[in-house]
């Protein structure tokens, strides 16, 4: 079930809100957990069993960790946190990377004439990358003393399974909502702002992300494109992935507000970044900070010399790329970002890059990000290299590429791309725009919501990009 569907907007959400507010406070988490399992199991009920098992393991581990002595970490605590981390990583590894590993082995074995093995064709549970990281943060936070454990299993199940951010984030750490699980307020102001977040998120998805996605699909699926078309397509994809993912985050935050929760901001105008380092402070903030606090810093961060710092950066970004998908393209995407982060850190304040005007640094950063998005979107490595060659004017377009212009350069797509650029570089962020709602803003939001619903009826099923991660 996706947020940008009539089924969710007109049926599931109203029913969920009525049930949630109808029951007494002591039953709200039970109702919310059951609603979340219903939401998650809509496509495949077996996925619910998987998530429930993961939830139970982490809950038990958290209880064991909480029983340890305050003066130091006991053997039982260390075993419990290890079991929690390993069980989540094994779960993620099996469903996401077994076939990737078999395929990689087959490629190497085939090159040397060795026997290959058939793929297992394992179905990837929706959102497994998100809820395993989220659930794992609970036991780690308890172990570190950053949060108190939950005594009630239903409360913990509600935290792990909460449908607003279950399948595509943001990744909510336990310490961020621990107090809210124990006590939170439900106010008209929160609810109203939540409605605004949902409306604007739906508008981002329907009015901008989906049309820009059509432009990207046409260019990336064409086989060969002219240079201008290649740039047009990758810019379209940059708008698609930003508006698509930030739209889901907006709607998740809005749904959380309607249920009394305040979730952290997940995007901060990333295409305003003047360096790749800044980009990762603004893009998918919940993932970048999770990797920083649970991986980069435990590895030593920047505390063990320059060489170790660069190794840590490279390793974190490689794993960050692999987190997105079991593909060499995602590994390369992460590696490129890791190299650029290392170069920026090595150059420091002496970098000639820093001497450019702010607009120039922003433009260069955006272009660098565009090249990395090619690996994110293209079907495989050979397709990525062919597309980059086209962007650099080094590709050889087939005669059929001349026909793309008739499809790509239509007024509807032109206007959508211009609208996307205006919103990206000049428009207010949803987080700031909804902070204080006025009658004028309410009318604008209502009109955008109504227009989105009308256009939604004309668009085919188009799930959010990060559902596959």
Image (cartoon, grey):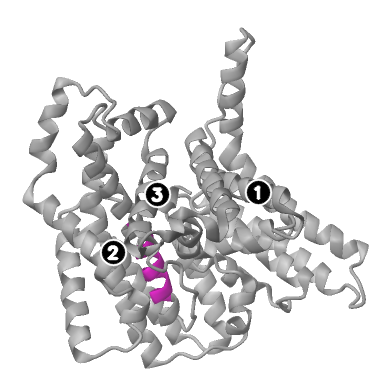
Using the numbered discs, state the Cα–Cα distance from disc 3 to disc 2 in whole angstroms: 14 Å
46 w.r.t. 440: above or below: above
Which of the numbered marks, if any, corresponds to residue 369?
3
Q: Nearer the viewer, mark 3 or mark 1?
A: 1
> Which residue position is annotated with label 1?
310
Range of magenta residues: 244-255
Q: Which badge, 3 or 1, comes first in the chain's sequence?
A: 1
Residue 400 shown left or right of residue 152 in the figure: left
Q: Are marks 1 and 2 in contact (CB under 8 Å)?
A: no
Using the numbered discs, state the Cα–Cα distance from disc 1 to disc 2 in whole angstroms: 31 Å
Which of the numbered marks, if any, corresponds to residue 166?
none
Residue located at (30% from left, 33% from top)? 392
Q: Are marks 3 and 1 in contact (CB under 8 Å)?
A: no
**Front in this rendered view, residue 172 or 111:** 111
Q: Which badge, 1 or 2, comes first in the chain's sequence?
A: 1
Spot occupied by residue 56 in the image (x, y as percentages of width and height): 69, 62
384 w.r.t. 172: above or below: above
Would residue 184 be counted in the magenta stretch?
A: no
> Which residue position is annotated with label 2?
424
Determine whether the residue tagged by mark 1 lies in a helix, strand or loop: helix
Neighbourhood count class around disc 3 (C-alpha, 10 Å): few under 14, some 14–19, many 20 upward: some
For the question of whether residue 458 can be seen, the reply is yes
**Front in this rendered view, residue 98 or 15:** 98
Residue located at (45% from left, 76% from top)? 256
């Amino acid at each position: 079930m996706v947020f940008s569907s009539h089924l969710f907007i007109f049926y599931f959400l109203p029913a969920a809100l009525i049930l949630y507010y109808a029951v007494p406070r002591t039953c709200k988490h039970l109702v919310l957990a059951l609603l979340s399992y219903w939401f998650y199991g809509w496509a495949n009920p077996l996925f619910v069993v998987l998530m429930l098992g993961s939830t139970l393991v982490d809950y038990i581990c958290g209880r064991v960790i909480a029983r340890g002595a305050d003066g130091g970490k006991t053997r039982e605590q260390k075993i419990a946190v290890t079991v929690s981390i390993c069980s989540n990583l094994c779960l993620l590894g099996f469903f996401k990377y077994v076939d990737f590993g078999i395929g990689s082995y087959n490629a190497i074995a085939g090159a040397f004439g060795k026997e290959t093995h058939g793929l297992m064709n394992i179905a990837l549970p929706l959102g497994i990358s998100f809820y395993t990281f989220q659930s794992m943060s609970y036991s780690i936070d308890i172990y570190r003393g950053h949060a108190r454990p939950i005594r009630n299993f239903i409360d913990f199940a509600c935290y792990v399974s909460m449908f607003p951010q279950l399948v595509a984030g943001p990744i909510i750490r336990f310490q961020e909502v621990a107090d809210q699980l124990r006590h939170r307020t439900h106010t008209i102001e929160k609810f109203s702002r939540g409605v605004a977040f949902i409306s604007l998120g739906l508008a981002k998805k329907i009015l901008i992300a989906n049309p820009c996605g059509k432009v990207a699909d046409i260019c990336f699926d064409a086989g060969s494109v002219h240079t201008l078309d290649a740039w047009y397509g990758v810019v379209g994809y940059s708008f698609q992935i930003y508006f698509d993912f930030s739209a889901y985050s907006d709607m998740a935050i809005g749904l959380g507000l309607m249920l009394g929760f305040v979730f952290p901001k997940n995007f901060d105008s990333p295409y305003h970044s003047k360096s790749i380092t800044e980009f990762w402070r603004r893009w998918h903030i919940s993932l970048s900070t999770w990797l920083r606090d649970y991986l980069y810093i435990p590895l030593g961060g920047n505390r063990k010399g320059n060489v170790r710092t660069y190794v840590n950066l490279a390793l974190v970004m490689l794993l960050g790329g692999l987190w997105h998908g079991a593909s060499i393209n995602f590994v390369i995407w992460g590696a490129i970002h890791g190299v650029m982060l290392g170069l920026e850190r090595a150059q420091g304040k002496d970098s000639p890059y820093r001497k450019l005007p702010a607009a120039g640094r922003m433009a260069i950063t955006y272009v660098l990000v565009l090249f990395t998005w090619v690996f994110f979107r293209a079907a495989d490595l050979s397709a990525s290299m062919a597309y980059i060659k086209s962007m650099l004017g080094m590709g050889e377009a087939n005669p059929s590429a001349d026909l793309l212009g008739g499809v790509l350069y239509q007024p509807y797509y032109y206007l959508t791309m211009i609208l996307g650029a205006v919103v990206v570089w000049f428009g207010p962020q949803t987080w700031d725009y909804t902070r204080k709602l006025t009658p004028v803003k309410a009318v604008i939001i209502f009109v955008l919501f109504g227009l989105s619903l009308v256009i939604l009826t004309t668009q085919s099923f188009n799930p959010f990009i990060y559902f596959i991660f």
